Image: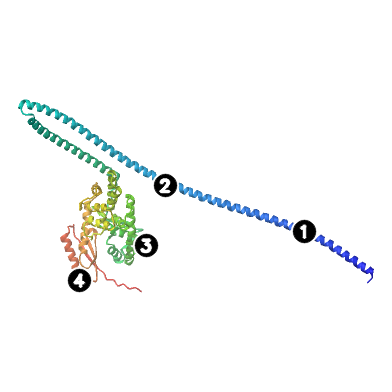
Amino acid sequence: MSVIEIVIIAVISFAAFLLGWIASSALGKKGIVAARQKAKKIIEEAQGEIEDAKKEKLIEAEEEIFQKRQNLEEEYRNRKNAIKNLETELNTKENNLDRKADLISKKERDIFLQQREIKNRENQLNVRQLKLEKLLSEENERLERISGLTGEQAKKILMDNMIETARKEAAGTVYKIMDDARKEARAKAKNVIISAMEQTATDHAVESTVAIVSLPSDDMKGRIIGREGRNIRSFEIVTGIDVIVDDTPEAVILSGYDPYRRELARITMEKLVSDGRIHPGRIEETYEKTVQEMHEYLTELGEQALIETGVHGLHSDLINLLGKLRFRTSYGQNVLQHSKEVAMIAGIMAAELGLDDHMAKRAGILHDIGRSTDRHSEGSHCQIGYEIAKKYGENPIVLNAIQSHHGEAEPISPISILVQIANDISRSRPGARREVIENFVRRMQSMEEIAEACEGVKAAYAIQAGKEVRVIVDHEKISDANSFQLVKDIAQRIQSEIEYPGQVKVTAIREFRSIDFA
């Protein structure tokens, strides 16, 4: 290779190197610019994300602050309501305290007046004593002049006269003070009783021996009667209540002396009418469900009575028995209403006298609890009620009030006496009792008791206003032949032991049932 070629090659190589270096520099500058732009874009995007995150955090912080503010406001409202309730309770207690303070002030005024009166009488006695001493002194001088007695003899005579005179004066004064005290006590007692009666004025309850069930149409009467009367006979056998289907439009009448049994029959009939399916099996099923539901209803009645009288803390069984008094009467007076009246009257009188009004109300509401049991229980309702209340741990004062409100035991507390008085007030008020309905109920009960006392009798119901006694016998113990003798024996006992108008029909029903399950 020649030198020229070598030079040419070197020049070309240098030129290529120079061109390559120039090109490389240009590309490098473009890369730097692109990198700077990319970095700037990344920074801008990062700043945007930071701003978005910042806004999101601010929103979350604002929401959290709003929620905390809501919670604080809710807590503030709750505390404000609690404080308001406390203020109401405090105001109530303050009013009660004011009332008690007024009572105490009244009693203090009465005591002060009595003390002042006693002091005046003492002053009068002192004045009389001074007069007596003066008279005796004059008498002594006169006796000494007239009789010529010695001073000791005259003194003895004068002392005897003075003692006898003072004794008579003192006896007269003591009698007057005691008589005034008795009159004042009677006046105060009358005021307390009248005040209690005025504050417990209630409507008179009129008890009936029938209940009316409304029907959607007169066509329903045919369903109630059933084919050849099987439905109405089944209903009367199950419930023990007489069903009267007459010309009364869209209604049937249930007749029976027992209010509890009549209410069960009324509810059962209403359910059957509402359902529309009326047959012997459905009647028995509905009646059984009604008996179960009645237990809950009795508890509701008892709880309502406790709320009305302000009594609390009774055992659940006692509450249920109390509700059952709604379906008990005494000479036509509803026993539950009577018990509430006695509780309120006894509580008011106890409060007026400064006694425990809550205990008085408790004793009053429970005083006739023995009437809630069935008529087969032995003993008076006072003794039965005493045993029931004792079983559930009632206070001895309450037990004594229950046992003594008819004089069967001696009262051990003023509350027992208040319950006696409240009981007399409630049962003696005009229109409270009707002896005629009570005699009728007793006659019905006696008829049923005579029938149920016979061997083989499962149940007995006096229906048709006492004109018929329907007897359900046990088919295993009483045959068809024996049932004729049974009704004859029952009829003879009713005729010899009970006074009644007209005739009484005794009907024995003997039914055999075969039951199996598939």
Tell me the quarter of the image containing the N terminus. bottom right
Judged left or right of residue 491, residue 271 is: right
Residue 165 falls in image quadrant? top left
The location of residue 35, given as percent across then percent down, is 75, 59
The earlier-in-sequence mark between 1 and 4 is 1
Q: Residue at x 86, y 63 (%)?
A: 19
The earlier-in-sequence mark between 3 and 1 is 1
Q: CA distance from mark 3 to mark 2?
A: 48 Å
The location of residue 182, given as percent across then percent down, is 20, 40
**Which of the numbered marks, if any, corresponds to residue 85?**
2
Question: Which residue is identified by label 4?
Answer: 481
Instruction: Determine the residue located farthest toward the bottom in the rendered image.
Output: 518
Instruction: Determine the residue located farthest toward the top in the rendered image.
Output: 145
Judged left or right of residue 300, residue 331 is: left
Residue 483 seen by the camera: yes
Q: Which circle, 3 or 2, is nearer the viewer? A: 2
**Which of the numbered marks, if any, corresponds to residue 275?**
3
Residue 45 falls in image quadrant? bottom right
